[in-house]
Image (tube, grey):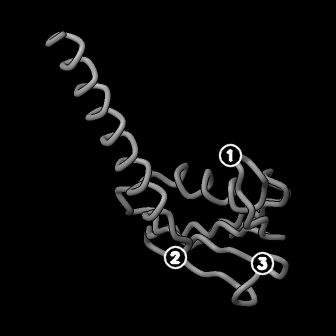
Amino acid sequence: MLEQQLRQAIGVKKFESDFMENEVIDRLVFPDIIVHRRGTNEHNLCVLEIKKSTSRVPAHYDRLKLSAYTSNVNGNTLRYKLGVFILLRMDVHVQYELEFFQNGDVIHLSGN
């Protein structure tokens, strides 16, 4: 009986921990810039992520977000029509790289 109660308590604790972790993760994913009409997802036009090359957060994370913002992966209902990733290279001269996303995929790359 005590062993069963202990297992249940551990299970509840794990569920709460997983739930809270997912809640925190869900709430911490915000784009840098969005172009949309408030109150509806019907007019989500563009989402931008901008990163300096000196950032400690990997650029891969921003690319994953843009892929998700522009697709219906994991039940996403935002469905932005266009995602733009801008990487600012902070070497001697500032250079940039652009990646464009649609339907979760990279559709175009450019830079200087």
The three-letter amino acid code for the residue at tag 1 is Asn
Spot occupied by residue 45 in the image (x, y as percentages of width and height)? 80, 79
Q: Nearer the viewer, mark 2 or mark 1?
A: 1
Query: Dot 3 lies on which element?
Result: strand
Q: Earlier in the sequence, mark 2 or mark 1?
A: 1
Which residue is more in the foreground, 50 or 76? 76
Q: Nearer the viewer, mark 3 or mark 2?
A: 3
Residue in the picture at 49% in, 76% down: 93
Spot occupied by residue 84 in the image (x, y as percentages of width and height)? 71, 69
Q: Which residue is mark 2?
A: 94
Residue in the picture at 56% in, 72% down: 31
Residue 81 is drawn in which quadrant? bottom right
Which residue is more in the foreground, 69 or 85? 69
Which mark, by number, is residue 74? 1
Cα separation, mark 3 vs mark 2, equals: 30 Å
Q: Earlier in the sequence, mark 3 or mark 1?
A: 3
Which mark, by number, is residue 44? 3
Q: Is residue 40 above or below residue 109?
A: below
Q: Is residue 37 above or below residue 2?
A: below
